[in-house]
Image (cartoon, grey):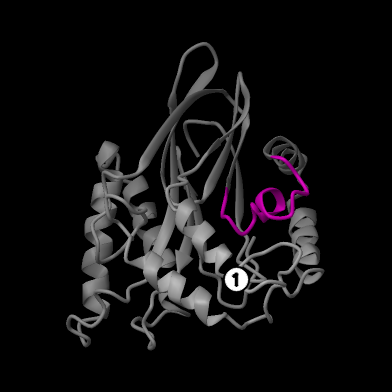
Amino acid sequence: MAGSRINEDGLGLLGPCAWIIDGATGLSTEQLTKGGSDAAWLAGTIGETLERLASDDRAGAEYLKRLESEVEGLFKEVTAHLPGHHLHHAPSACLGFVRAQAGGAGKVRVEGSFLGDVVALVPTEQGIVRWTDERAKPFERKTLAALEAGGHEPGQMPEAVRQQIFENRTKLNQPEGYWVVSPCHPWAGHELRFEADVKAGEIIVLATDGFMRLVDVFSAYTDRTLHAALKEGRGDDLIEELRALERGDSLSGAYPRVKMHDDATVLVIAAETGG
C-alpha cells in the first residue's frame, strides 16, 4: 500500500525472501535519474535487483554484497552525463530483507538484515518483536529539535531543519553515523542482523517508518496491536486511519514530524520457506 503521488517506497516477495524499501531524496537541486524521483529510482532499482538475486540459488549469504555492487554500477550508468557531480547528492534507502529457511519441530528459521528504520514485526515465544536499525535515531532527534515551535506549514521546511538534514547527511555510512543503502558510499557488511524461530504459517509484518507512524508518532497502536490488526486483514483501514491522523494535525504541531505526510507501505507475509 502506497500513499503519495510519487511513491519512494518499495516491497517484494519471492520464494523464501521478502523485503521492504524506503527511499530518501538526495541533496541535489536537480534530478540525477529518470525515475519519478531519484529516491523512487533507487527504490525501484533495489527491488528489481533483489528479485533477480532471490531467484538465484547461488546468492546465499551474498545477497547484500551483490546488491551493493549492482546498484553502484547501475547508478554510475544513469549518471554518466554528470561525472563526479552526484557523489554527495545521491539518493539513499532504508532496507529490510528477510529470508526463511527450514527449521525443526514445525518452526521456520527467519533471518533478517536491516539498514535504517524500516521495521519487521516478528511473532516469537516472547511476543511480537521489532527488528529495525535505530542508528539514525540520534540524528532524527536533532532534526525534530530544529523544528519551529508549533509546527510548520505543509510542504514548507524551516531553514533550521534543512541545515540539520544537510549536517546529518555528512554522517551517512560513516563509523560514527548511520548506515543505509547508497549507490555511492559502501554499506554492505554494516547491516544489523536478526534471527528467530517462528511457527510455520505465522504472520510477519514488514513496514516503512511512514506506516509505523501509527505506533511511533501517533501512538494509536502498539507493535502488538498493530500486528494483530494486520493479521485480521485490516490493512486498508489502517492506511485510512493513518491519513486521517495526519490530516488532523496538518501543521505537525501536536505530533512533530518533518513531513506532514509520508509514504506508508506494509507487507504482510506468512512464515514459509517457499513462495
Of the pair 244 and 51, the residue shown nearer to us:
244
Where's residue 262, x and y in %? 62, 67
Horizontal side of 60 relative to 157 (left or right) equals: left
Displayed quadrant of residue 264: bottom right
Q: In this view, does 234 lie above or below 227?
A: below
Specify start and end residues of the magenta stretch as a single range: 207-222
Q: Is residue 66 above or below residue 223?
A: below
Three-letter amino acid code at disc 1?
Answer: Leu
- Classified by dominant secondary structure, the portion drawn in magenta counts as loop
Q: In which quarter of the image is residue 269?
A: top right
* Residue 213 counted in the magenta span: yes
Please indicate whether residue 204 sits to the left or right of residue 63 in the image.
right
Residue at the spot 75% in from the left edge and 44% down from the top edge = 221
Q: Which residue lies at the image location 65% right of the left edge and 68% below the top edge? A: 3
Quick check: 21 left or right of 60? right
| Secondary element at tag 1 | loop
Q: Position of residue 255 (x, y in %)?
A: 72, 62
Q: Residue at x 73, y 51 (%)?
A: 235
Q: Horizontal and vertical percent for residue 112? A: 43, 37
- As drawn, the residue found furthest toward the left would be 83
Instruction: Indicate whether 55 appears above or below 77.
Output: above
Magenta stretch encompasses residue 266: no
The residue that label 1 is drawn on is 147
Judge by depth and name the residue closer to the eye, 56 or 72.
72
Q: In which quarter of the image is the N terminus?
A: bottom right
Q: In this view, does 173 lie to the left or right of 93?
A: left
